[in-house]
Structures are given as C-alpha cells and as structure tokens.
Amino acid sequence: MSKIQLITRDLGSHLNDKIESADTVCVLSSFVMKSGVNFIKDTLKKAAKNEADIKICTGDYLYITQPEALEELLSIDERIRIRLWKSNGVSFHPKAYLFQSNEHDVLFIGSSNLSNSALNQGIEWNISVSDEKEVFDEALKELLFSTRIKRSH
C-alpha cells in the first residue's frame, strides 16, 4: 500500500532509520557538507558493515560541496561508492534519497541537501513516497542514468 508523507522537520532521523535497514542506499544531493556527513556517518558505517549497496552522488555546482565532506565519506567504508557530478556551469540541484529493502522501497525528494541544518532544524520540505514501485523504479533509473552509477547485483 502506497504511503505519501510531507516531512517539514527532522528529515535526518527518517534517513537514519531507513539507512539502517536498507539493502540499497542511494543519495543524490547537490551539495554535501561535513555536518551532514557527520549526522549520518555512524548509520552509513553500520549499513556498509551489513553489506548494503551504498551510492552517493553530489556535484561541484557553485562549489558549495565541501572537500572535507567528501574525504569524510571516503573514510567511512571503502565499499561506499561516491561520484562527483561535474556541472560545467549547468545547474545541478537534486535532493533525493532512495532506500530499498526486502520489506519496502522508500523515496525522499525535496529541498534538503546533505547538511546538518537541512536534516535537522532548517526550513525544508520533503516528500516521502513508500511502496510505490513504478515511481521508485523510475527514480532509481533516472538516478543511475543521470549520475552514470551502474547498479550492481
């Protein structure tokens, strides 16, 4: 049964809950800040140890992504795949978090980049869509195509 939810506060706790139980984690965030990585770091580490397939894509658009944040992501676990979208001046502004498990698929899309402010106390609007297979599959296909991250089985 499909479930749609508006999340205007504390997206980070929702993400950590889903990361912990996911078999597949895909993060597409135009900007990544060290504060956001630190917020989900422990949960990402647990998911990697549980052999979750973790893919993270961010971009260089407007040069906001912090190099320290990327270094921190790389230090979590060598199995986490990270891609940097080279914008070449083209707007790159997506914010999507996809989680797949045996129980269900969940997709979060909204305004929250991967920063502590956006995940906790900032004014952000996000939509969560659960168990809507066609929507999830389309989002995953777009994410994998647009970021050129190959899905592994």
Image: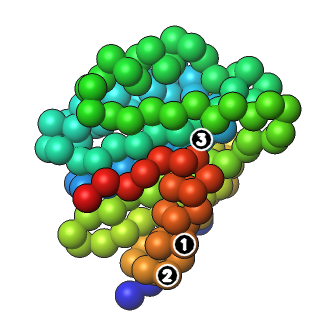
Distance between mark 2 and mark 3 Cα atoms: 22 Å
Query: What residue is rendered at 81% in x and 41% in y?
Result: 91
Distance between mark 1 and mark 3 Cα atoms: 17 Å
The reply to whether residue 58 is in sight is: yes
Dots 1, 2 in contact, CB < 8 A: yes
- Secondary structure, mark 3, is strand
For residue 102, which quarter of the picture? bottom left
Res 134 label: 2
28 or 120, nearer to the observer? 28
N-term-proximal mark, 2 vs 3: 3
- Alpha-carbon neighbours of circle 2 within 10 Å: few (<14), some, or many (≥20)? few
- Secondary structure, mark 2, is helix
Q: Is residue 139 left or right of residue 25?
A: right
Q: In this view, does 84 lie to the left or right of 2?
A: right
Percent across and percent down for residue 147 are 57, 47
Distance between mark 1 and mark 2 Cα atoms: 6 Å
- Alpha-carbon neighbours of circle 1 within 10 Å: few (<14), some, or many (≥20)? few
The reply to whether residue 129 is in sight is: no
Query: What residue is rendered at 79% in x and 25% in y?
Result: 62
Percent across and percent down for residue 56 are 46, 39
Dots 1, 3 in contact, CB < 8 A: no
Of the 4 image quadrants, the one containing the C terminus is: bottom left
Q: Mark 1 points at which residue?
A: 138
Q: What residue type is labelled 1?
A: Glu
For residue 106, which quarter of the picture? bottom left
Query: What residue is rendered at 15% in x and 36% in y?
Result: 49
5 or 113, nearer to the observer? 113
Q: Which amino acid does label 2 sit on?
A: Glu
| Above or below, comparing residue 3 to residue 143 in the picture | below
Res 29 label: 3
For residue 115, which quarter of the picture? top right
| Above or below, comparing residue 118 to residue 134 in the picture | above
